[in-house]
């Protein structure tokens, strides 16, 4: 397969449980299956197939969260992530923006001027403070977007971004406590070597891969693991 060498290794990282598994490529079988979204009739050309490496299904836990990388060296830092626990705050405690502060939007937000400010929340982790302000529709108080601001220990703003969702998606709940019986959605910490920490899981999308890992630095860059999210 293009770009993959027999000298490479498949690194399978469960980032929520901080567990890494690896398998050398040379010990794996390759396979091809017809892409179900390929419409022309037989005989099929090469572009009708999807190619892959066959991994033992026993390697995977049904409820784990994996990122897979194929290459020469392990790119994962292998440090435990920190769950974000949110508590509600007064609106006056939400950071005040300067007139020239630019808010980055990770999705198109239509008619934001028609939304009203909702509840405010704060969480603290890895020496940072995380602030959320909900924006709602005035007719039914449905939360449409969340404004996220991250401050460092000196109260310098390092992230100023709006999270929302596309058609078929939804905003994920904010956890107010760590309970073994409830899923925690937002996490923060370092996943990749030589990269800033990330924050993730504010929304779930029906037609895109999840989660969106947002690097915590002023450039607002992010990465999304490749997946097949077609329906």
Image (tube, rainbow, N blue to C red):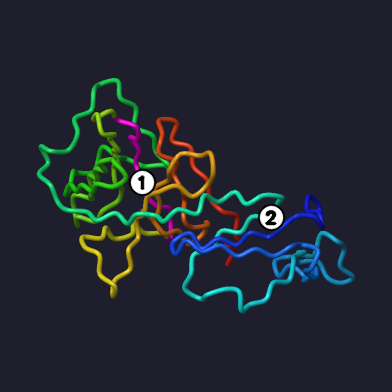
Q: Residue at x 19, y 48 (%)?
A: 121
Q: Residue at x 43, y 35 (%)?
A: 220
Inter-mark Cα distance, 1 to 2 = 30 Å
Quadrant location of the C terminus in the rendered image: bottom right
Q: Residue 182 lies in what quarter of the image?
A: bottom left
Q: Which residue is mark 2?
A: 70
- Where disc 1 sits, the SS reads strand
Local packing at callout 1 (Cα closer than 10 Å; few below 14, some 14-19, many 20+) is: many
Q: Is residue 166 magenta?
A: yes
**Residue 179's disc number:** none
28 relative to 12 in the view: left or right: right
Quadrant location of the N terminus in the rendered image: bottom right
203 relative to 132 in the view: left or right: right
Q: Is residue 103 above or below residue 66?
A: above
Q: Which residue is mark 1?
A: 163
Local packing at callout 2 (Cα closer than 10 Å; few below 14, some 14-19, many 20+) is: some
Query: In the image, which residues are magenta?
Result: 157-168
* Residue mark closest to the camera, 1 vs 2: 2
Q: Nearer the viewer, residue 107 or 132?
A: 132
Q: Residue 171 lies in what quarter of the image?
A: bottom left
Q: Is residue 127 above or below residue 20?
A: above
170 relative to 27 in the view: left or right: left
């Amino acid at each position: 397969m293009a770009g993959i060498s027999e000298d490479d290794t498949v690194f399978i990282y469960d980032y929520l449980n901080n567990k890494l598994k690896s398998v050398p490529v040379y010990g794996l079988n390759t396979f091809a299956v017809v892409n179900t979204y390929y419409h022309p009739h037989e005989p099929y050309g090469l572009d009708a197939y999807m190619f892959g490496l066959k991994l033992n299904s026993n390697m995977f836990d049904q409820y784990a969260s994996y990122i897979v990388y194929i290459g020469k060296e392990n790119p994962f830092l292998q440090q435990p992530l920190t769950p974000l626990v949110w508590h509600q705050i007064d609106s006056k405690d939400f950071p005040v923006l300067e007139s020239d502060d630019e808010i980055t939007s990770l999705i198109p937000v239509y008619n934001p001027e028609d939304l009203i400010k909702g509840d405010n929340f704060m969480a603290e982790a890895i020496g940072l403070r995380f602030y959320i302000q909900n924006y709602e529709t005035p007719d039914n108080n449905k939360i449409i977007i969340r404004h996220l601001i991250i401050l460092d220990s000196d109260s310098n703003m390092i992230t100023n971004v709006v999270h929302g969702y596309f058609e078929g998606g939804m905003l994920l709940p904010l956890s107010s406590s760590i309970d073994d019986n409830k899923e925690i959605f937002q996490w923060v910490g370092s996943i990749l070597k030589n990269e800033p920490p990330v924050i993730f899981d504010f929304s779930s999308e029906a037609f895109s891969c999840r989660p969106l890992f947002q690097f915590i630095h002023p450039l607002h860059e992010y990465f999304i693991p490749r997946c097949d999210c077609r329906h």
